[in-house]
Amino acid sequence: MNNLLNNATHFVVAGSGLSGLSCVRYLLDQGKQVKLWDTRPHAQIPDTLTIDVVCGELPDNYWQGVEVLVVSPGISPALPAIQSAASSGVQVVGDIELFAQAVQCPVIGITGSNGKTTVTLLTTHILQQLGINAIAAGNVGLPALDALSLKPEVAVLELSSFQLETTESLNLHAATLLNVSADHLDRHGTLDAYRAAKQRIFFHARCAAVNRDDNETLPTDSAIPVIQTGLTECSTGFGWRGETQTILYNGQPILRMADTQLVGLHNALNIQASLALVSVLNVDVEQAAQAVKTFKPAPHRCAKIAVKGGVTYIDDSKATNIGATEAALIGLGPTLAGRLILIAGGDAKGADLTALKPLFDKHVNAVIALGRDGKVLSDIATNGHYVATMPEAVALAASMSQPGDTVLLSPACASLDMFKNYQHRAEVFANAIQELPA
């Protein structure tokens, strides 16, 4: 792709969220002529913006004279207005493409259906602990273009499928596709299309961190060098010794899970992925493993938030798709002594929730479901219950529990049918626990 920052002058930014506004700021700083379009007719636009803004339907001939349309991740390139722009000769890209054409430092890229935020933050933490000025950006919160002004030594990007589908020229020192499970099918249409979007992370990657036990994580380009991870022992790359719950490097013990603040087998893989990614930068891997010990996991990702009446409550509200809940059940199930009661449900975004039944049968003693698609979950569980609200779900879980049991909120669904976002869902869960009798 041509260097847009050198060759184009007239830009439209679609979307007035975090990434959209960061694009506006960046392009104005580069001396470009910028217009803002938000697809929502009543979008709240900051009063400080002095550029031309259109909300909702576009006027005739809007694309005349426009060279580049920068689409925010939440806006589908398949929208008729965007297709019209492309057919008018406008180049359609995302903010990550602008970042890719401007960044000067090494970049590490992380994608996957689940675990990418943990791996992004952990990778950044390891590098910072080793004295490297690393910054996490992208889908993790800080827009990628805003990170440029901070002049990092290494940029660590969390990349969603939405961001990757509008990115062509991102050169990565190391990349990983952690896993693939059905997600965002309401946007991508098919699992194959979603998988193809994720694979775009490898287009210009120098090295890939892959799970030797999961072919979905392999780049389709077999010429890309790989560093292997996995939940088996191996004499090269990273591995796992189950009897001692220890991560291995080149066959030798390097880190016990008990010495970290992360739990579950899925997090053992996340740690390995982070170590594999930083190893590409020629850091001392043993020192990198020591840095993992001081990492505190992000909220709402298999985080123990309370013990009440001898019952442990775990918040995994960030599990907004089937794969995330699968990871939680597989990771936690074998490690628990007591019974596991699962609270799940919400908006499945077109995914087939019945795929969870084998794991319910294997690891879950009771399922308490809620939300738009929750009835599917309560119906497929041997001991399933459907309730109307989160406080009802927590009260029922508490009444079914005894000391030593675990109550896990891992919805397998998006939250917007009942809550503002997954953080709000977690807050209601935590408040309901606090309201339980002592």
Image (cartoon, rainbow, N blue to C red):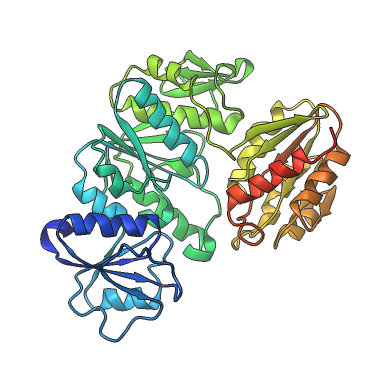
Residue extending farthest to the front is 47
Residue 88 versus residue 384 in the image, above or below: below
Decide which of 46, 369 is in the foreground and name it.
46
Residue 16 in picture, x, y percent from top left: 38, 63
Name the image quarter holding residue 306: top right
Is 132 displayed left or right of 196 in the figure? left
Q: Along the horizontal axis of the image, is 225 left or right of 425?
A: left
Q: Quadrant of the N terminus?
A: bottom left
- Indicate the quadrant containing the C terminus: top left, top right, bottom left or bottom right: top right
Q: Please state the horizontal and vertical placement of residue 136, each as a whole percent of the image.
A: 37, 38
Determine the residue positioned at 76% across, 40% down. 433
Q: Is residue 169 visible?
A: no
Quarter of the image where one finds residue 56: bottom left
Residue nearest the viewer, comparing 236 with 79: 79
- In the image: residue 353, left or right of residue 92: right
Q: Residue at x 43, y 61 (%)?
A: 74
Expressed as whole percent of the image width and height from the top left, the position of residue 400 reads 87, 40
Q: Residue at x 29, y 25 (%)?
A: 132
> Residue at coordinates 41% horizontally, 26% vertically from top-left?
275
Q: Nearer the viewer, residue 75 or 348?
A: 75
